[in-house]
Image: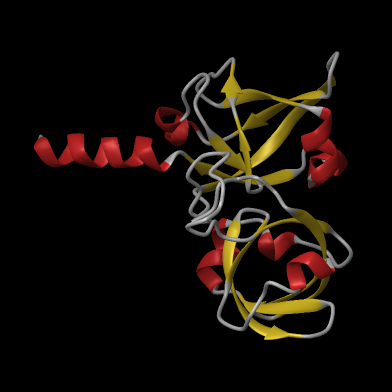
Amino acid sequence: MFTGIIQNLGVLRRRRTGVLEVEVPTSIRERLTVGASIAVNGVCVTVSELSTKAFSASISQQTLSCTTVGRLREGTPVNLELPVGPEGAFDGHIVLGHVDTIGRVRGVFRAREGRVFIFSFAREFCRYVADKGAVSVDGISLTPFAVSKDDFRCAVIPQTLALTNLQYRANGDSVNLEFDILAKYVEGMIKSVH
């Protein structure tokens, strides 16, 4: 389980059929082992190989089809988060690393402090987005506001902007969206009663 608090940026070193190779900072590399989980742009992957400065992870066809991972180019900065341990702080919200859909940056505006992003998504997911709730965008825990049936806004403070790949995002870019698991559980319980 993750919290959506990005720990570092990595760089996609290479993508070949079914495998990602990501260069990571030493602080992340030292904590990785083969078989460990790590979120890359909000996608939970399992480390299959380690080198001095990078890790590799196998990527299924299912993951490639419903996330932006298959679209990443070599040299692209990616958000990295290790799973939260029992001693870790729980600062964001519950993020599983199981992307629901690909969204798109519909707009980016300068704000007094940081930026305001507008993210669009398929209308079928609007029931999972609550004003002042939680959503994971490329693995980043953000708070949506001005929610409509097919988009929402998020205010991004300078610190989050500086520590994540949002600093490189522009209109039209694709992003991984994971909606709040609590909303999906509630929906499942309501459906099971009816």
Image quarter for residue 65? bottom right
Q: Residue farthest to the front?
A: 87
- Taking 20 as reference, is 194 left or right? left
Q: Is residue 188 left or right of residue 98?
A: left
Task: Please name the residue shown 80% across and 47% down the image.
Answer: 165
Number of labelled discs?
0
Where the C terminus falls, by quadrant?
top left
Who's the residue at 67% across and 25% down the image? 154
Residue 102 visible, this angle: yes
Quick one: 170 or 98, which is closer to the camera?
98
Residue sitting at 78 percent across and 55 percent down?
8
- Visual colour scheme: secondary structure
- Place residue 103 in its image quadrant: top right
Q: Position of residue 78 (x, y in %)?
A: 77, 57
Q: Residue at x 49, y 48 (%)?
A: 100
Reply above or below: 156 against 46: above
Outermost residue to the left: 194
Q: Is residue 170 visible?
A: no
Image side of residue 21 versus residue 126, left or right: right
Q: Nearer the viewer, residue 93 or 174?
A: 93
Residue 91: % across, % down: 58, 39
Q: Nearer the viewer, residue 123 or 73?
A: 73
Residue 96, percent across and down? 48, 54
Quadrant for residue 45, please give it: bottom right
